[in-house]
Image (cartoon, rainbow, N blue to C red):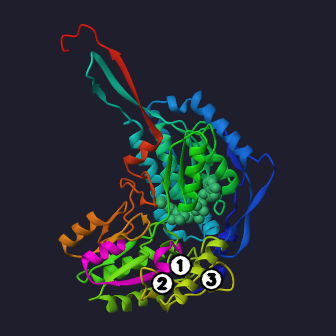
Amino acid sequence: MSSATNGSSKSAATHKIKFTKLFINGEFVDSVSGNTFEAINPATEQVLATVAEGREEDVDLAVKAAREAFDNGPWPRLSGEARRKVLLKFADLIEENADEFASLEVMNGGKLFGPVKNFEVPIASETFRYFAGAADKVRGATLKMSKNIQAYTLREPIGVVGHITAWNSPAYMFATKVAPALAAGCTMVIKPAEHTPLTVLIFAHLSKLAGVPDGVINVVNGFGKTAGAAVSSHMDIDAVTFTGSTEVGRLVMQAAAMSNLKPVYLGLSGKSPFIVFDDADIHKAVELATIGNLTNKGEMCVAGSRIFVQEGIHNVFVEKLTAMVKGWPKGDLFDLATRHGPQNNKKQYEKVLSYIEHGKKEGATLVTGGKPFGDKGYYIEPTLFTNVTDDMTIAKNEIFGPVISVLKFKTVKEVIKRANATKYGLVSGVMTKNIDIANTVSRSIRAGAVWINCYLAVDRDAPHGGYKMSGFGREQGLEALEHYLQVKTVATPIYDSPWL
Ligand code: NAD
């Protein structure tokens, strides 16, 4: 294992940060106040860049630009074909800049170069291509009215959209929100998470090269209570999409309700069950349980963080899982063999460590990990708890870090009940060779996705979103377009028609 201290040394030596300002009306600009904040490298705890800090007045300027671009600019009025061409060019540019995106996400997010370059960036560019293909297929219906009236529906762009995002996968999140909004003909203001302000600025720069007109995409970096709150409460933003915690999602919804009643889409927290039955392929189950919890150092809304294992294979499963978690490769974040990195930020690092303390205090068995490592950076050892019970804090709350909890169960009926005994409902996993069990469980779990004998099966054509307090609305899939469109019915009378 190489030392954690050199986690992103290569990046610091070779990568220059190009964009640190706000992006409003097609230009990189300072904030009105001139205020800035620091972007930190979580592997070194060093300041990576000083970034313009937007507040209410900057959000206001960005909304004015987006409003003008929507009300009077070309973008909403372009044919679907013309928008498709721009989205396809944008996708190509994203792909061409994969190294740059991956380097930035290593340095600013503690992510791994290989997975970002080979997985998240291609998902981002393919998401643009997917919605490029939808841009010229937005169409309405012809209605059969009861009176002598004919009518049809128009599906029109909803207007100016506010996007507020979390920090765990900035490139992926940009694409899942911006590509469908662009395809629909919307204009937008993006408020990225304060911990990862840099990636979105590269996207903003590329948007101009792709031919997105000025004012269509605006980026206001800043903090949640100021810039974020200004987006969700703005009277001239027509819809808000939010990805983040359930607690803040509630605030966003409240602000939207108390301002102009704008619709909101919420992609929120999760505490997803991963259920392993006695007949499962145990090697596959162990591998998926590990990947489903330790990928991106556990900073995944879809982490399968409650692993229910049937009693017949429980002990063997734990033995194999322990070996895999202990061997999870640490090292330089640019090394393709490395699988583990630092937590994204200090607050998250401290939160994860405090959950580990809860686990220990409340009587779960700490099998491996459980402490920080390295002499700098927010590194926490991959951690495995067994003998976890449903009432423990680590079984109830989202940890959002490299902490795995194993719970034992006996019957199908019991595990369905326990898997559903959570306020969340984002995704779930089921490992079994028995089709009847797979069918029963997938219809009984209250979650936005059920992954049978696989995990992290996220795809641009698969709608992603939550049940219960994991949010509502869907990203990815054609369903995502619906957040950015509204339906208008157009009716005209028909006189003297022989068909009526
Ligand atoms: P967070 O809720 O703290 O912050 C999310 C965003 O909201 C940030 O941009 C933040 O600045 C902004 N914000 C904070 N206060 C605000 C306010 N009062 N008004 C408006 N905006 C405000 O979440 P986080 O810590 O950045 O992200 C982690 C969470 O995101 C986890 O719970 C994770 O499960 C969730 N998440 C969900 C999905 C999904 O698809 N469901 C995907 C990724 C992450």
Q: Tell me residue 27's x, y (percent).
A: 70, 42
Which quarter of the image is occupied by the C terminus? top left
SS at mark 2? loop
Q: Which mark is residue 60?
A: none
Q: Amino acid at mark 1?
A: His
Question: Mark 3 or mark 2, which is nearer the start of the sequence?
Answer: 3
Q: Pick whichever, 328 or 227, lies toward us.
A: 227
Seen in the image, is 111 located left or right of residue 444? right
The residue labelled by disc 3 is 4
Mark 1, residues whose alpha carbon is within 10 Å: few (<14), some, or many (≥20)? many
Res 119 seen here: yes
Residue lying at 55% horizontally and 69% vertically, measured from the top left: 113
Q: Amino acid at mark 2?
A: Trp
Seen in the image, is 148 located left or right of residue 296? left
Q: CA distance from mark 3 to mark 1?
A: 10 Å
Q: Is residue 148 above or below residue 445?
A: above
Q: Residue furthest right?
A: 34
The residue labelled by disc 1 is 340
Which quarter of the image is occupied by the N terminus? bottom right
Mark 3, residues whose alpha carbon is within 10 Å: few (<14), some, or many (≥20)? many
Q: Tell me residue 213's x, y (percent).
A: 59, 36
Q: Is residue 349 above or below residue 15?
A: below
Residue lying at 18% horizontally and 14% vertically, measured from the top left: 499
Mark 2 CB in 8 Å range of ligand 1?
Answer: no
Mark 2, residues whose alpha carbon is within 10 Å: few (<14), some, or many (≥20)? some
Marks 2 and 3 in Cβ contact (< 8 Å): no
Q: Which residues are magenta?
A: 392-419
Residue lying at 48% horizontally and 35% vertically, measured from the top left: 157
Q: Amino acid at mark 3?
A: Ala
Q: Pick whichever, 158 or 6, lies toward us.
A: 158
In terms of image quadrants, where is residue 381? bottom right
The residue labelled by disc 2 is 328
